[in-house]
Structures are given as structure tokens and as C-alpha cells.
Image (cartoon, grey):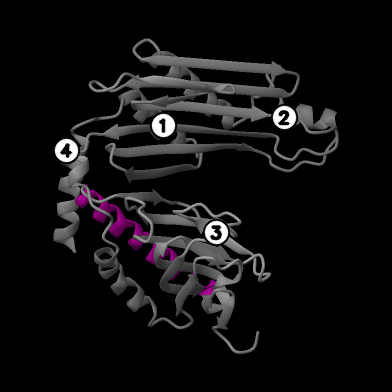
């Protein structure tokens, strides 16, 4: 394993040397972490180079039921309605960095609207690729989208007062910074993600965990034959991912198989340890295989009721090709980790946690008493 990780680090180093991100962006990314702003990292290879993205959420007091005057006093600092900590520091730092970078950027775009307690900020900055097609920009409402770029930074922030007694989301925003590394491999040299090879690396983690009291594993089998109409049968499905669009006339085929691992609440520490090791193996694997298509996501926090996609093995998206995925889901019972492979479209039953198999609406439960 040490030799494998060392190879991955060397491969990642060779790639990162080819296209370093702007130093000012890196300083900003690190500073937001120091402020305690929750940040998220992702890395993917879809054939245009290795894309790295850091994003940070800027949320402010999501639920209030106070009078307008009290709310205004709490949310304002001096006369600026977006001046509250730590977001004010983060937003100010982002804007200062973007302003400094605008002198050398290929394009820079800023839109602001402030009226009373309503605020909107859209700030984008882009750097073109050194070679190839020229940068293209598109305006979507008050935001900008870019194509043929090497590096992009973006700040989106909105704060709206809904009524005098209730605020749904007082302020919400997002900072994102992404850049491409050059991939020395051509499109013809790229391959689908090797899910079987990756699963062999992570299987020992699960086998060790299963020796712990309370940790369980269950098979996954979800089959949706072409033409089966789940609505007609009264079985509402969650279509988590599809390669072929679903319509009234077209109910495409999908077969998902794999394993569902359950870590009860009392084994939360073990679950977090396994997730940490899964992340390390996934990161090492994708960096050691720049020829494979994938989307990797790093999590530092997990939230109840939310899915976290750790790794998606991409394919060329031809119908009935296999694609591998690794997810985790946290609920009141504990952590659920699913390692699955899908052929065609992925159809996920609503009650997937209780099922051994699902075939065109026919359920086989893990436990007989349901």
C-alpha cells in the first residue's frame, strides 16, 4: 500500500507541475479555511484535463422568527447590510483578491445590487488557456459562465428578507475557484474508470470493519427493465442518475448491483475512520490513473439526511456501459456506505435501505417483518 500511495503522489506531482493555480487564489483558499468557512474540494477528469475545484459556503442564520427591527440590528454592522462576521471578512477578502487579480485576468465581471436589506453580488474572474480556442463568456441573468478557460474564480451572494416575521434564508452565498491541469494523455488514450480494480483496494477496509459488533453488509440489486412504468405500478422511484432520458414513452433499462454497509450510531468513530481511509485510497487511485475518467469529492463534514458522493467512476456514457460509484448517507440510525456498479440508468428505490432487491416494483426485504 505504501508503494502504491508513493506512486500516486509522484504521478500527482508530475501533473500539478504542468499547470499551477494562481498563488493569490491559493492564499485565498487557505485563508477561508483559517476563518472556519466550510470548504469543499473536488477533482475530476472528463477529458479536458484534470479539473480541481475549491468551493466555500457562505450561509448566515438560516431560520429567524423575530421582528424586523431586532433582525435589522442583529444583521447590520454600521450601515452595510451584508456586514456580519465571519462572512464579512470572507466576502471582503474574496473581493480584494478578485480586484487585485483583475489587472492580469482575461476577463473580470462584477454586478451588485443593494436596496435596504436586500443584497446581490455576482463577481467572476477568468484566465484564458495559453493555447487552443479563445475564451468565451456567456451572461446568465446576472452571472457569467466561461468556456475554454484555464482558471476561474466566482463569488455569488444574495440576502433577501421574505417578510417582517420570518426569514427563510437570511443570507446565502458561494465562493468557488477552479483550474485545469494539463493531462498529457490524449482523448484516445483515456479509458473508463476501472471499478473492479478500485473495489479490490477498498474491500479489506470493509472486511475489517465487519468484524466489529453491529456493523453489517447487505446486497444491493435494483433492476428496472426497459418499458416498466413505475408510476403506473404506483411505485415512485428516485432516479438518481440516468444515461438515457426518461419520458412517458421511454422507460430505459437500468441494473445496479453492489453492497450496502451499515455502521450503527454507536460505531460512528469507526465509520469516520473508514471514510477517511476510503478518501485516502480514492485520492491516491485517481492521481495514479490520469488515463481514467472520474469525479472525486473530499468531505470534511457529513450532515444528517444528506448524500455525500465520494467517488464517481465516469465512462463515455454509452448506453449500458458500467459505471462505478461510492456514496455515504447519514441518518438517525448511523452511517450507510454504498459501493455500487450500474449498467444503463441508475434507478434507486425510495426504501432502498430496507431492501435486499428491487425488480420492476417487486421488493424483497432484508427482514421478513415489514
248 and 117: which is toward the camera: 248
Q: Which residues are magenta?
A: 264-290
Residue 154: in magenta span: no
Residue at 49% across, 37% down: 56
Per the rendering, the mark at residue 160 is 2
Q: How far apart in space, not on screen, are marks 4 and 3 (Cα)?
A: 36 Å
Name the front one of labels 4 and 1: 4
- Residue 154 location, x and y as percent? 47, 27
Q: Secondary structure at mark 3?
A: strand
Q: Quadrant of residue 166?
A: top right
Name the front one of labels 3 and 1: 3
Residue at 19% across, 32% down: 18
Q: Residues within 10 Å of mark 2 (few under 14, many from 20)?
A: some
Q: Secondary structure at mark 1?
A: strand
- Residue 356 location, x and y as percent? 51, 80
If you read the primary sequence from the N terminus, does the residue marked by circle 2 or circle 3 appear first? 2
From the image, give the main secondary structure of the stretch colored magenta.
Answer: helix
Q: Secondary structure at mark 4?
A: loop
Q: Is residue 103 left or right of residue 119?
A: left
Q: How far apart in space, not on screen, are marks 3 and 1 (Cα)?
A: 30 Å
Q: Quadrant of residue 85?
A: top right
- Residue 255 location, x and y as percent? 44, 69
Using the image, determine if residue 370 lies above or below residue 98. below
Q: Say which residue label 1 marks.
A: 177
Residue 265: in magenta span: yes
Residue at 18% across, 40% down: 186
Name the front one of labels 2 and 3: 3
- Residue 29 location, x and y as percent? 40, 33
Q: Say which residue label 4 marks.
A: 184
Q: Say which residue label 3 marks.
A: 239
Amino acid at each position: 500500500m505504501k508503494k502504491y500511495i508513493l506512486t500516486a503522489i509522484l504521478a500527482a506531482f508530475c501533473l500539478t507541475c504542468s499547470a499551477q493555480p494562481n498563488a493569490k487564489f491559493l492564499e485565498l483558499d487557505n485563508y477561508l479555511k483559517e476563518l472556519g468557512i466550510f470548504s469543499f474540494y473536488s477533482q475530476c477528469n472528463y477529458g479536458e484535463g484534470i479539473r480541481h475545484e475549491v468551493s466555500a459556503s457562505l450561509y448566515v442564520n438560516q431560520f429567524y422568527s423575530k421582528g424586523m427591527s431586532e433582525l435589522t440590528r442583529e444583521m447590520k454592522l454600521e450601515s452595510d447590510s451584508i456586514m456580519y462576521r465571519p462572512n464579512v471578512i470572507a466576502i471582503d477578502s474574496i473581493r480584494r483578491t478578485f480586484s487585485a487579480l483583475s489587472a492580469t485576468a482575461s476577463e473580470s465581471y462584477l454586478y451588485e445590487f443593494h436596496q435596504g436589506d436586500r443584497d446581490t453580488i455576482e463577481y467572476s474572474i477568468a484566465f484564458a488557456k495559453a493555447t487552443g480556442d479563445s475564451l468565451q463568456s456567456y451572461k446568465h441573468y446576472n452571472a457569467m459562465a466561461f468556456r475554454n478557460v484555464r482558471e476561474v474564480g466566482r463569488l455569488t451572494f444574495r440576502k433577501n428578507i421574505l417578510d417582517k416575521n420570518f426569514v427563510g434564508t437570511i443570507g446565502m452565498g458561494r465562493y468557488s475557484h477552479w483550474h485545469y491541469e494539463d493531462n498529457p494523455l490524449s482523448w484516445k488514450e483515456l479509458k473508463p474508470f476501472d471499478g473492479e480494480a478500485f473495489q479490490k483496494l477498498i474491500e479489506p477496509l470493509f472486511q475489517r470493519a465487519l468484524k466489529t459488533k453491529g456493523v453489517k453488509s447487505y446486497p444491493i440489486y435494483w433492476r428496472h427493465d426497459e418499458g416498466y412504468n413505475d408510476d403506473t405500478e404506483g411505485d415512485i422511484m428516485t432516479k438518481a442518475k440516468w444515461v438515457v432520458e426518461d419520458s412517458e414513452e421511454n422507460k430505459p433499462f437500468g441494473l445496479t448491483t453492489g453492497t450496502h454497509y451499515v455502521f450503527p450510531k454507536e460505531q460512528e468513530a469507526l465509520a469516520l475512520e473508514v471514510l477517511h481511509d476510503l478518501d485516502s485510497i480514492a485520492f491516491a487511485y485517481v492521481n495514479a490513473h490520469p488515463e481514467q475518467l472520474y469525479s472525486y469529492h473530499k468531505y470534511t463534514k457529513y450532515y444528517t439526511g444528506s448524500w455525500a458522493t465520494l467517488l464517481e467512476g465516469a465512462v463515455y456514457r454509452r448506453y449500458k456501459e458500467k459505471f462505478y460509484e461510492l456514496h455515504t448517507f447519514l441518518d438517525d440510525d448511523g452511517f450507510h456506505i454504498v459501493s455500487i456498479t450500474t449498467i444503463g440508468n441508475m434507478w434507486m428505490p425510495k426504501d432502498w435501505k430496507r431492501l435486499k432487491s428491487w425488480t420492476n416494483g417487486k421488493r424483497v426485504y432484508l427482514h421478513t417483518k415489514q
